[in-house]
Image (cartoon, rainbow, N blue to C red):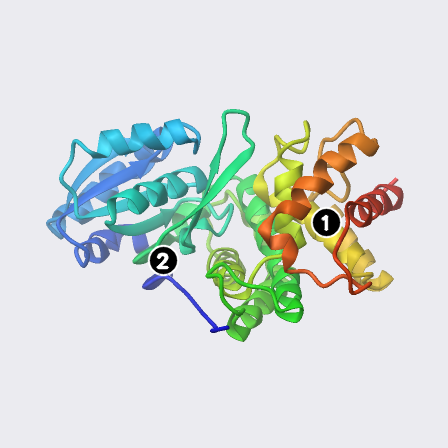
Amino acid sequence: MNLVFGSPGRYVQGTEVLAQAGTWLAHCGRKAVVVIDSYVLGLIKSRLDDTCSRSEVELHYITFDGEITADGIADLRAAAGQVDFDMILAVGGGKCIDAGKALAHSSGRALITMPTVASNDAPTSKNYVVYDAHHQLSEVGHLLSSPRYVLVDTGLIAQAPRQFLLAGIADALTKKFEAEQCFASGGVNMFGARPALSGVVLARECYQVIRQHAEVALAEAGSGSVTPAFDQLVEAVLLMSGLGFESGGLSIAHAMTRGLSKVPGAQQQVHGFQVAYGLLVQLVLEDRDADLMGDLLSFYQRIGLPRSLAELGVTAIDDGVLMQIAEPTLNAPHARNFASLSGGPLTCNDLISAMRALEDRTH
């Protein structure tokens, strides 16, 4: 099987990136559709207009305040169909980034992403997630190529509230352990190919940066201040994490979102919190040593990540609920990127035992 490593065409990060955005967009054409939510539009429109005017790039704004559902995407495509455009600029959080990807997928136009929060690594990846009306994951879409440019203005991201950065940290934290498991088990990465060692190395370094800087950066979040620690953490959450999971691969932690999204309480939690909990389940399945588990659980507690289903918001924890989580998890493609200690296939009972062990440990 071939090894495949993928990445955006260019990743640009700094405090003046918004002011320079027109220069980057001009490399892709002269007319852009901007997919953006109403709040962010009010926050940056004048500055974005200025930089694009200087570079002679025409902008057509489409506000997207809905959910990433089949109907929401259809409405977006219909609105964009009224415009002649060369490229798509997706600005905002995960929903607008994914909406921009869905539009790029159907139109074939170049995609530029500009995150205004570091709540996940969607800006660098080719994947987008579609949910049904009950906020249950229905499909994962894949662009034919990664975003052309990723424009990260850390001055903007430093203004976002702490909870957005915490969600991004939670999502990025898992990638080392998932990429290592995918690599060791002979699994496949997000390109359906052999995992790249380069992706695994980036995922490992991502974890180290998070452990070194997360607590300091979280204390600074929302202040508008961009310190070296904050800057490095943003790079880890957006770039290292994104390249690490796409080229290194995912495993049980992300597979668990398929089951957790079906259970009240967990269903309402952000993606990062779901996978952070899923990581703990994966580590129990790997029979990791007590020192590692204790260290990670202490870190979770200090920064405010869920260590159990109860802390994830699940109030009724019985065999039926645990099976409701376990079955969809094992049916998820990422679950195949796991080598069980027994040498045989992972079972629902294995997952249920791991979840119960976490509940016992945190009560």
- Residue 277 in the image: state x and y as whole percent: 70, 46
Taking 219 as reference, is 318 above or below it?
Answer: above
* Residue 35 falls in image quadrant: top left
**Residue drawn at the location 56% of the way across and 61% of the way down:** 249
Instruction: Please say whether residue 130 is visible from this viewpoint.
Output: yes
Q: Give the x, y percent position of residue 273.
A: 64, 42
Q: From this viewpoint, which residue is outermost toward the left? A: 56
Query: What SS does tag 1 mark?
Result: helix
- Taking the image as shown, residue 297 lies to the left or right of residue 240, namely right
Looking at the image, is 95 positioned above or below residue 349? above
The tag earlier along the polypeptide, 1 or 2, is 2
Circle number at residue 248: none
Where residue 146 is drawn, which disc sits there?
2
- 1 vs 2, front mark: 2
* Relative to 74, residue 214 above or below: below
Corner quadrant of residue 212: bottom right
Seen at 37% across and 39% down, the residue is 99
Spatial CA span between label 1 and label 2: 32 Å
Q: Identify residue type, mark 2.
A: Ser
For disc 1, the neighbor class at 10 Å (few under 14, some 14 to 19, many from 20) is some
Q: Nearer the viewer, residue 156 or 298?
A: 298
Q: Mark 1 points at which residue?
A: 300
| Residue 53, percent from left and from top | 13, 46
